[in-house]
Image (cartoon, rainbow, N blue to C red):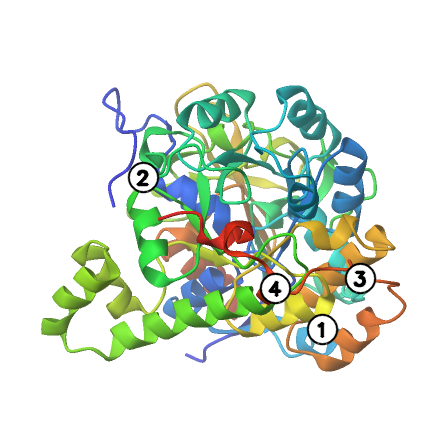
């Protein structure tokens, strides 16, 4: 089985953690900061970070159109936290000039759980991932308020004040989580995405 | 490292304030620029320029130097107005050892507390016990031992101190190179020499052993103190910083909005001289600055903290 080449959008955020997680999941991971680098990858991860910053830099360095085009052509993309916001069709509580990629038919609320003092960890069960719940880290995390018809809900918060909120979704080759599996050492979600990329090549 | 709070109700219940979520927050700032701001208007300029966070304070370090006197935590009204003005994380500074200023900032809901040598210290022996808080802390360090003592006290992020408010990057480079050199030295030591290394660093053996094995701090390492140009920011990234704090360098320059945006771009493309040349053009005058070597002992902020 060949290892898929998966890029990590390296404009800002926890690029190194995603790169390490992808490598541990059997992919060849490399940073993507330029359109020429995007051309060399089979799939793309949009890391955790600050979505306003990533959005701005994607425009400034002319990555938006090429990424939108690759998504339209079926390239698999996984976004965690800020990456989920970047993949959302509609963003609430974002900046007026903030734009995501042409991604998942969903409405995402930015910083939905509150400020950093409300950031938390909790287990989350994910449809399609065996072996028990993932230990999920939510850091100034978004949640999904609405999904379109073609979107599969993979996981929700199980307990606490935000119980029932959608925090993991998939629409065809696009995958998004409000939390950060790259920070936990559990590589199941990255392996799931690597499989998705392998199947799309 | 143990978590500061644990849940005893249910194993599935959400838990806040853990080392994991505090340190994870800093991971999300990596590759970014955190800018000092003194008004809501400046905070908006910083956010527009692509800052990953702002540091709310009453006076930037160069004004603290110029005006003298005791420098303290900012007015909660001012911090509130900045939190309302922007959607990116807001940090604020407390005096070294001032646990009540930190309690106040936590109750305001700031996203990160900087226990900072830029303000006048409140305790010349102890730093704050940062494990006692839900809000995460960033602390300055001039060398590895100091960084490890802060991490032991619960700091979830470290920044080099540099010499704030000077526009002179030389101390930031010294601190960043020093920390990285000391980490490489630990990696080269036989394990039976790590005990003495821990003694010399005045840091716990377990932490020293962890760094010898991993070759990095267990928390994110940013740079701060004297960064005034895109080239300064890029150099600090090349020297191993994971992100950049810019204090007086932006709003004490001729064209803050343009300089702020240029420093953001330079931090992302720190290894690309062509992009760096492009973003360095036409920025107008940088802050005037002070040669850090000419500062008298009492004016050296980096020497505060122990």
Find disc 3 in the rendering and name its residue.
B286
Quarter holding the N terminus of chain A is bottom left
Real-space CA distance between mark 3 and mark 4, rounded to the nearest whole angstrom: 19 Å
Q: Which mark is residue A34?
A: 1
Tag 3: Cα neighbours inside 10 Å, few (<14), some, or many (≥20)? some
Which chain is disc 3 placed on?
A: B
Is mark 1 in CB contact (under 8 Å) with mark 2?
no
> Residue at the location (37% across, 68% down)?
A24
Find disc 2 in the rendering and name its residue.
B125
Residue B294 is situated, as x and y percent measured from the top left of the image, at: 61, 64
N-terminal of the two: label 2 or label 3? Answer: 2
> Residue at the location (13% across, 65% down)?
B195
Of labels 1 and 3, the one closer to you:
3
Q: Which mark is residue B294?
A: 4
In this rendering, do the residues under marks 3 and 4 share a single chain?
Answer: yes
> Residue at the location (48% across, 43% down)?
A179
In this rendering, do the residues under marks 4 and 2 share a single chain?
Answer: yes
Real-space CA distance between mark 2 and mark 3, rounded to the nearest whole angstrom: 37 Å
Real-space CA distance between mark 1 and mark 2, rounded to the nearest whole angstrom: 49 Å
**SS of the residue at dot 2?**
loop
């Amino acid at each position: 089985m060949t290892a898929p080449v998966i890029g990590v959008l390296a404009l800002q955020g926890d690029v190194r953690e995603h790169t390490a997680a992808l490598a541990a999941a059997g992919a060849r991971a490399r940073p993507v900061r330029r359109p020429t680098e995007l051309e060399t990858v089979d799939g793309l991860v949009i890391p955790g970070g600050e979505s306003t910053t990533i959005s701005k830099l994607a425009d400034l360095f002319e990555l938006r159109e090429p990424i939108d085009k690759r998504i339209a052509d079926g390239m698999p993309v996984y976004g965690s936290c800020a990456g989920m916001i970047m993949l959302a069709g509609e963003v609430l509580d974002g900046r007026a000039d903030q734009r995501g990629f042409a991604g998942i038919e969903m409405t995402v609320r930015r910083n939905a759980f509150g400020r950093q003092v409300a950031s938390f960890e909790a287990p989350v069960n994910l449809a399609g991932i065996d072996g028990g719940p993932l230990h999920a880290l939510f850091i100034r995390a978004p949640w999904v308020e609405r999904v379109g018809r073609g979107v599969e809900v993979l996981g929700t918060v199980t307990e606490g004040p935000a119980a029932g909120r959608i925090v993991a979704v998939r629409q065809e080759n696009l995958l998004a989580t409000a939390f950060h599996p790259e920070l936990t050492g559990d590589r199941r979600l990255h392996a799931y995405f690597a499989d998705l990329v392998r199947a799309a090549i | 490292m143990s978590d500061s709070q644990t849940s005893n109700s249910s194993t599935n219940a959400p838990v806040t304030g853990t080392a994991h979520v505090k340190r994870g927050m800093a991971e999300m700032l990596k590759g970014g620029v955190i800018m000092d701001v003194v008004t809501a208007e400046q905070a908006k300029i910083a956010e527009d320029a692509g800052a990953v966070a702002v540091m709310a304070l009453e006076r930037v370090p160069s004004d603290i130097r110029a005006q003298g006197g005791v420098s303290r935590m900012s007015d909660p009204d001012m911090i509130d107005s900045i939190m309302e003005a922007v959607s990116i994380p807001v940090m604020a500074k407390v005096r070294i050892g001032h646990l009540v200023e930190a309690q106040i900032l936590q109750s305001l809901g700031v996203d990160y507390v900087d226990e900072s040598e830029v303000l006048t210290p409140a305790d010349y022996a102890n730093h704050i016990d940062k494990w006692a808080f839900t809000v995460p802390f960033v602390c300055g360090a001039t060398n590895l031992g100091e960084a490890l003592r802060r991490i032991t006290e619960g700091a979830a992020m470290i920044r080099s101190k540099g010499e704030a408010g000077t526009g002179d990057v030389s101390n930031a480079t010294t601190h960043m190179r020093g920390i990285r050199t000391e980490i490489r030295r630990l990696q080269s030591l036989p394990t039976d020499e790590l005990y003495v290394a821990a003694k010399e660093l005045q840091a716990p053996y377990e932490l020293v052993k962890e760094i010898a094995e991993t070759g990095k701090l267990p928390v994110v390492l940013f740079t701060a103190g004297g960064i005034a140009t895109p080239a300064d920011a890029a150099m600090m990234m090349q020297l191993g910083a994971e992100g950049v704090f810019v204090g007086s360098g932006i709003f004490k320059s001729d064209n803050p909005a343009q300089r702020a945006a240029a420093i953001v771009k330079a931090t992302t493309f720190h290894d690309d001289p062509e992009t760096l040349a492009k973003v360095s053009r036409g920025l107008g005058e940088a802050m005037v600055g002070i040669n850090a070597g000419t500062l008298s002992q009492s004016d050296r902020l980096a020497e505060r903290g122990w």
